[in-house]
Image (spheres, grey):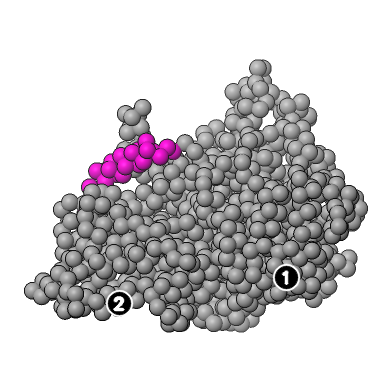
Amino acid sequence: MAARRGKAAGKAGAAKAAGAAVRPGADERSLVACLRHDAGFPVPDGLPAALKDAISDAQKAVRTRIENLLAAQPQARAVLAGIADHSPFLTDLIRVDPARLVRVLEGDPLDTLAAARSATVAALEATKDEDAAMAALRRLRAETALTVALADIGNVFDLATVTAELTATADLAIALAVDFLVREAVGARKLKKVGDEGLGYTVLAMGKHGARELNYSSDVDLIVLYDPEVAPLGKDVEAAPFFVRMTQRLVKLIQERTGEGYVARVDLRLRPDPASTPAALSVDAALDYYEREGATWERAAYIKARPIAGDIKLGHAFLRQLAPFVWRRALDYAAVAEVHAMKQDIHAFRGHEAIAVEGHNVKLGRGGIREIEFFAQTQQLIAGGRDPRLRTPRTLEALAVLAETGWIGEPARAELDEAYHFLRRVEHRLQMVADAQTHTLPEDEEALAGFVRFMGYEDRAGFAQALTVRLARVQDHYSKLFEDAPPRAVVEGRLEFPPAKDDRETLATLSGLGYADAKAASATVRGWLAGEPRALRPESVREELAAIVPLLIDALARGGAPDAGLNAADRFFREMPTALRLMPALRHNPDLVRLLATILGTAPRLGEMLAHRPSLLDALLDPAFFGTLPDEPELAARLDAELELAEDEEDLLDRARRFRQEHHVLIGVRILSGTLPAARAGEAFARLADILIRALEKAVAARFREAHGRLVGAEVAVLAMGKLGGREMTAGSDLDLIVLYDFDEEHPESDGPRPLYGGQYFARLTQRLVSALTTPTNAGQLYEVDLRLRPSGRAGPVATSLPRFEAYQAEEAWTWEHMALTRARVVVASPAFRARVEAAIGEVLRRPRDARRLAADIVDMRGAIADEKGDDAPWDLKYARGGLIDIEFIAQYLVLAHAANEPRIVDTSTLRVIEAARRVGLLDAQDGQVLADACRLLHDLTQVLRLALSGPFVPGEASPALRRLLARAGAMPDFSTLEAHLFDTQRQVRAAFERLLSTEPQRRRKRA
């Protein structure tokens, strides 16, 4: 602390030397005297309007004090102006308690934080009231948040101090909460007075918390353990249920949002097998689990483990017992394959060099913080058992020791260290905006521009240059980490396939890998190497194949269904017309071999498409595959160029279908490889459908006019509805469409060789368009099309006039039809007609409604869907309680109930509606975060399942490969953790549904 104070005093002295005035009698260590505006904010002439507004309700003395402080300190004025302009969260902290700002500005920041913690200790020790305890803990968090943010933005604290202070507050809050619960339990005689033997209940901090590297709005990852032999339990108190309840209370004390906010979000999913174990488990059970089935990722997690609350002695004893599991005595080169597999599960392709700015995740994205952490942790796991110096939990210390001990070069350490500092600064600034646990840069141009200014850059170009240079450096070091590692085919035993007969040792090896019919597997591979499939007959191809066979066999075995995977590979090779280009690519890119094995063994839908049309795999050999997905103009230009080559109408339809198939493969492979998140995948599928609809509508309309001519004033609009409208399509989505039209009714007859009248003209045109989209050709089918969302459903005409549509929506439409209309999006129309259609839709959505009646209608509809489809299967991600239907219905309710007064929430995307509702205050921060996170999770999992399976997902029947794939899609270390997270998420979503549509609980009792 003395060093930090010296640094702060040095900065104050520098400011003084530069001419900055220090208020009379002020301590030069005070935060206001130390703040620097070299964060890049301009110095305003006076107090900015946003800051004036934030302190407008303060007592006059407080307001005057702030004004005087900032008048004397232009550097501080610049920092506060930047916060007021760019951080609603910090501005709200100032608005709620302006006196706190005075206290923070006038004190040494380290002294301020120490005093806040001391006050919290005193408050907790003096109360038995849970509400009072929670309030004190939340005040501590708020004071920490404001102090650390000002010291961080104003360059008073370095990164180590920022993360240490954030961690210290979290440590203390959790320790005080445990102490409070223990005193309560002693008072209730559930526990005896804790003596020298200890409490027998310990809380371990994991991840960034354990490493004292917490970010500004981080979860705290905890593992809670107890020892019933040590715990001083009262008479007839059972250890397990008592400590589980105590842990649940602990989570409430820390996590529950009150009027004063929250302390931290608590994540207990790093405990052993979280889907089937309670919130707290015994030390013996935990040790037994790690001895039996602890995974490499769990070894990595325990590098950062640290006891922080309860029985600290018990926590340290547990970690000592676990040390042989985490730290292997010998140089653990056997772990290289597993570490390499973990790396591939995060990012599938070493050559995927695309680094974005908009929407880039600075933690999990390419070149991000996670890659720096992983770079260090993998080498710690390999060598830390032999060299205790490598066992530090802190990332930058680990990099330094790795350099000192020769595991990495000093230039690599220096570049990774500098990039880590920069990326953590970006991460913290992102989280300061709205106190959200986000690591993703804004995608919206205006929002990104604001964030760039908050980072202190004048424009996007300067920030983009600074960011991408560092991301590229990190990615380069990360990609080289395992470049000398052999392909991950760690097969014990021989794999040889002589042409004449099976090799006996090879059969034993195949059996050991899990192949149930080793002889059949051997015969299949021998057939490949003998050139039985036509594509494998060239000698050069078979030489390349021989080099990858062990890796392919191992990769298929790791999928969990080796025989089925090998059979799929056999069909694939036998149906390929040529492998001259593919086989060298497979040999020189082991990741592509694993990807092919993943597709064949994990995603039958995609594998079947490749098996029947292996030429689609050419797209994976295109260097453009490793770049960004094409935007809409580029994709449309490619399709137009392809369709211009069509010789006739049938050829045009074939080309459209092949175009769609190829791009579906590209999108699907990106989803499987983890390089394309669900939100982007849904948009990519929808973008592809949009341009195909437009291109075919244009072609169909041109041919139609040749036969039937034109109608005077004819206008046509194709509306995308459902998942297409919301840009949330999956590989299996059909197209929900509505066709609207208008024309001059005084001239109802078309002028072509075979004239048609009015509505008949547009009905025929619509039927032609649907036929072009749905009719199977030699190249397959394009899409299924559903027109049932049109007015009057199946009973209505296939195309509807705009005046009739407006009248129907105003007078006849049911609530569910208005709900569907929240996702309506014009795909095809002239600019003028598009404006008319969008205005008509907007008028319906912005109509004032009785919110309670609307909620009752939606709850009734949800109940009817549950009666028909069921809602008790959690892996039915759409229909389950707390599933996508619940989230979509909440979003649609918010639009219909509030668009009249708050039009900013109108959007066809469920996620964007939720996020907009949170921004404008229609959802509180907790519900908004829960629903947004749930929406992303469920869409991520749905994308994978729609690619992988054509039927329902049954966890017990799923291959290990698919379970791993789902875990990765859900950003969880394994399937058990994912399932626990999914079920917990669904419970939270359902609670939000019932709370927001408050008629639901009463209705459920009535139905029961």
- Considering every residue shown, the one lying at the far top of the view is 236
Q: Amino acid at mark 1?
A: Met
| Image point (65%, 17%), residue name | 236
Answer yes or no: do the residues labelled 1 and 2 have beta carbons within 8 Å? no
Q: Which residues are magenta?
A: 848-871
Q: Is residue 493 magenta?
A: no
Point out the tag, 1 or 2, that comes first from the N-terminus: 1
- In the rendered image, residue 214, in percent from the top left (x then y), is placed at 64, 56
Circle 2 packing at 10 Å, graded few (<14), some (14-19), many (20+), is some
Find residue 714 and report its image quarter. bottom left
* Element type at mark 1: helix
| Image point (62%, 21%), residue name | 189
- In the rendered image, residue 84, in percent from the top left (x then y), is placed at 45, 68
- In the rendered image, residue 633, in percent from the top left (x then y), is placed at 44, 79
Find residue 121 and report its image quarter. top right
In this orientation, which residue lies closer to the viewer: 409 or 640? 640
Q: Which residue is mark 2?
A: 703
In this picture, residue 762 sits left or right of residue 518: left
- Can residue 598 be seen here? The reply is no
* Element type at mark 2: helix
In 3D space, how far apart are the residues under numbered discs 1 and 2 (Cα atoms)? 44 Å
Residue 314 vertical position relative to residue 375 in the rendered view, above or below: above
| Image point (62%, 76%), residue name | 622
Find residue 675 and report its image quarter. bottom right
